[in-house]
Image: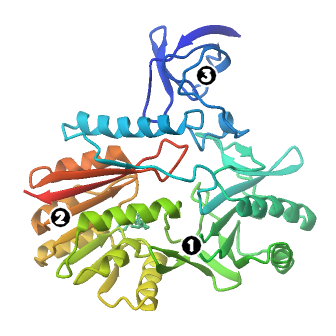
């Protein structure tokens, strides 16, 4: 195999090292600016064409990686960077996105994370046969190969021990893992959700079909070993898809949901509802939203893409009225129950597409003062943003988990709104993902 010496010039948005290989621009994970290394080249491979043999020059930004699957897993991309460097990378990356879009680039605040490991409250792994043995783990990036893991550092000890023990139960009870090609076997994924304050734990077993032979024994063994598990759910997913959860589910044990607190408000969380994965940082994020909203008690607030109602309920204390809109049925049902149980009366949640809902509000000329939006990575729609331009709330607070779609969307609001303030919250430590909150005021 051919060997080459390569030099890294900069980083791309995924934290991969960029440089030149002849006329070709390469992007290599785990390679930092100014570093030089000897790589083997496999022209056949599109992804991971270059394999590091030896670094000749290392960057002072580099740190030792404690994870043993770092180079193959791909789930965390920045573990080889010192934490300060990770933060600098994220800040620069967001600023660059703004600059390229001709929007004011300055980031006012960066909220770092105190916890750099075990920060996730949710773990999801796939199970598979490999050479006669059951393995479990995350899918390797851009492939369907499972990277077996014994201990994922961003997940808690409890989450790790549950998924590890399930591998044993499957072996003991002869429960087959799913085979993607043949579409046979029983267990596709296990999802574990853990509440950081109440410590409740949910285990979701995603099965390829309705039948779950040995399920009472499965539940018994799991509960005997981990009495702290408060609910076990079977989710049925027979589709040929990489989406983890199917539509149908049945509760095998417990309440069918867990409860947790964020900003002293209690939230019910079902298996299919979205819930932020880093609770400590989420509280800081919501506090920032609260600060940006600066409510006085007279305002009508819209919480768009509201999930289980978290942001809306945090703001409801100081608002006159809050209107939430969310398309996931389970999340809306959780949100309404959450408002009821926390005795928050000035909030109402609607199950609808956020764009349709906002267009209708614009048509009805509803008077709103503050609009908070927290769309998925794909961002919002031009129609949604145009409806904001018609509704003209005094403030728009955009919570974004993807700076690229964020700046694209901000361009639609640029005519009527001025960017007042920006914060980055480091929710996804060790990964290239960035959470940004932007405060916009009407011109
Ligand atoms: N604000 C919440 C949820 C943010 S995640 C929180 O902080 O927890 C984004 C949410 O948008 C998810 O709950 C998802 O179900 C919802 N969503 C995605 N597309 C949507 C659409 N077109 N209309 C309404 N909600 C949508």
Q: Which residue is mark 2?
A: 395
- Please identify the quadrant where the C terminus is shown: bottom left
Toward the right, the furthest residue is: 172
- Does the residue tagged 1 have its C-beta within 8 Å of any atom of ligand 1? no
Q: Are marks 3 and 1 in contact (CB under 8 Å)?
A: no
User: How far is disc 2 from disc 3 in space, using C-alphas?
Assistant: 48 Å
Of circles 3 and 1, which is in front?
A: 3
* Element carrying mark 3: loop
Q: With respect to residue 127, does 392 lie above or below? A: below
Q: Earlier in the sequence, mark 3 or mark 1?
A: 3
Q: Quadrant of the image for the N terminus?
A: top right
Q: Which mark is residue 247?
A: 1
> In this rendering, would 394 be left or right of 309?
left
Q: Nearer the viewer, mark 1 or mark 2?
A: 2
Q: Is residue 403 left or right of residue 37?
A: left
Q: Residue at x 63, y 68 (%)?
A: 193
Per the rendering, the mark at residue 49 is 3
Q: Is disc 3's CB within 8 Å of ligand 1?
A: no
Residue plotted at (69% across, 56% down)? 125
Of 431 and 353, the residue lying toward us: 431
Residue furthest out toward the left: 443
Q: Is residue 207 above or below residue 88?
A: below
User: Going by the image, does 399 lie left or right of 431?
Assistant: left
Frontmost residue, 382 versus 303: 303
Q: Quadrant of ligand 1?
A: bottom left
Where residue 140 sits: x, y (%)? 65, 41
Give the crowd class for mark 1: few <14, some 14-19, many >=20 residues within 10 Å. few
Residue 344, picture quadrant: bottom left
Question: From what the image shows, is residue 215 above or below residue 35?
Answer: below
Q: Are marks 2 and 3 in contact (CB under 8 Å)?
A: no
């Amino acid at each position: 195999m051919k060997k080459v010496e390569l030099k890294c010039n900069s980083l791309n948005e995924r934290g991969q090292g960029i440089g030149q290989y002849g006329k070709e621009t390469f992007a290599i994970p785990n390679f930092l600016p100014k570093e030089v290394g000897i790589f083997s080249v496999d022209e056949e491979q599109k992804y991971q064409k270059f394999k590091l043999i030896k670094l000749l020059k290392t960057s002072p930004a580099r740190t030792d990686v404690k994870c043993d699957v770092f180079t193959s897993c791909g789930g965390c991309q920045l573990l080889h960077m010192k934490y300060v460097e990770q933060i600098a990378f994220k800040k620069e990356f967001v600023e660059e996105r703004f600059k390229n879009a001709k929007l004011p680039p300055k980031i006012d605040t960066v909220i770092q994370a105190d916890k750099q490991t075990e920060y996730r409250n949710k773990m999801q792994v796939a199970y598979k046969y490999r050479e006669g043995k059951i393995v479990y783990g995350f899918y390797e990036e851009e492939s369907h190969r499972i990277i077996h893991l014994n201990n994922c550092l961003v997940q808690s000890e409890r989450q790790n021990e549950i998924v590890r023990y399930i591998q044993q139960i499957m072996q003991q009870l002869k429960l087959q893992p799913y085979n993607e090609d043949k579409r046979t076997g029983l267990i596709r994924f296990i999802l574990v959700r853990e509440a950081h304050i109440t410590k409740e734990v949910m285990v979701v077993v995603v099965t390829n079909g309705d039948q779950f032979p040995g399920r009472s024994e499965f539940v018994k063994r799991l509960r005997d070993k981990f009495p702290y598990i408060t609910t076990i759910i079977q989710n049925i997913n027979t589709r040929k898809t990489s989406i983890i959860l199917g539509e149908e589910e049945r509760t095998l044990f417990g309440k069918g949901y867990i409860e947790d607190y964020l900003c002293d408000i209690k939230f019910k969380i079902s298996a299919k509802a979205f819930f932020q994965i880093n609770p400590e940082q989420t509280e800081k994020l919501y506090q920032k939203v609260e600060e940006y909203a600066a409510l006085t008690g007279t305002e009508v607030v819209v919480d768009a893409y509201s999930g289980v109602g978290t942001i809306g309920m945090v703001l409801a204390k100081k608002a006159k009225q809050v209107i939430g809109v969310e398309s996931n049925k389970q999340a809306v049902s959780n949100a309404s129950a959450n408002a009821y149980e926390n005795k928050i009366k000035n909030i109402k949640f609607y199950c609808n597409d956020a764009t349709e809902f906002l267009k209708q509000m614009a048509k009805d000329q509803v008077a709103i003062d503050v609009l908070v939006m927290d769309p998925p990575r794909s961002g919002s729609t031009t129609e949604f943003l145009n409806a904001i331009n018609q509704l003209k709330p005094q403030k728009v607070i955009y919570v974004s988990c993807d700076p690229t779609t964020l700046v694209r969307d901000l361009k639609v609001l640029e005519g009527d709104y001025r960017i007042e303030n920006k914060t980055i919250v480091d929710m996804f430590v060790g990964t290239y993902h960035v959470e940004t909150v932007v405060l916009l005021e009407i011109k």
